[in-house]
Structure formats: structure tokens, C-alpha cells
Image: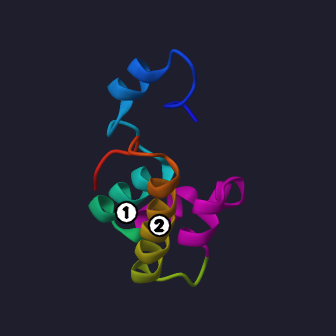
Amino acid sequence: KLAPAPGCGAIYARMTGRVFSLDQILLLLMLYFGHETIRSMIEPNIGCDKAFEEAFAPGVSAVEAEARLRSRITILRSQMLGLLAPD
């Protein structure tokens, strides 16, 4: 954890609200370009990350993918103590 680490308070303060997770980036891309477009790009590497598998596996709808990504973002947000960028 960055905030409680000795001497890291200033770094933490500068980074607060500025960090994007892969889940957030995938959600933004999906909302902009569409689920199928992003899924077709990710498909060759779907096994390299849990976010890829959960949101873009065959048979997962756009609504399901969005819900799964938002759920993961909520979990990350609670763990990252304010570092994640807002939605």
C-alpha cells in the first residue's frame, strides 16, 4: 500500500484519482467501440487476463460484460484507497 509507506504520502496524493485499471480501460473501449469489436480484438489473447476472460469470452453479452467489468472496478476501487480514476 502506497499511502502508509514511509515517505510516499506525497506520491500517493499526486496519484489519487489518476490511476486507470485495465478493467476501466476495457469498459471505456467497449462503450465507445462496442462489445463485439473489442471482443474480436481480444479473442486471440483472451487467456492472459481474468478481465479479458470474464468480459469477452464467447457467449458473454455486452450487458453481462459491462456488469462484470463494473463489478471488478468496484472491488478494485475499495482496495486502492482512492487511487482509481473516477468513472
Disc with the residue nearer the chain's start (1 vs 2): 1
> Where residue 20 sits in the image (x, y, percent)?
41, 43
Residue under pointer 2? 69
Quadrant in the picture for the N terminus = top right
Observer-nearest residue: 53 or 11?
Answer: 11
Q: Helix, strand, or loop for circle 1? A: helix
**Which SS does the magenta portion mostly show?**
helix
The verdict on residue 39 being magenta is yes
- Mark 2: give few (<14), some (14-19) or many (20+) Cα within 10 Å: many
Observer-nearest residue: 33 or 82?
Answer: 82
Q: Residue at x 40, y 40 (%)?
A: 83
Observer-nearest residue: 21 or 75?
Answer: 75
Residue range of the region highlighted in magenta in the rendering? 37-57
Q: Residue at x 41, y 73 (%)?
A: 66
- Which residue type carries mark 2? Leu
> Where residue 57 sits in the image (x, y, percent)?
61, 73
Q: CA distance from mark 1 to mark 2?
A: 10 Å
Residue under pointer 1? 30
- Which residue type carries mark 1? Met
Where is residue 11, by image quadrant? top left
In the displayed structure, 3 sits above or below 65; it is above
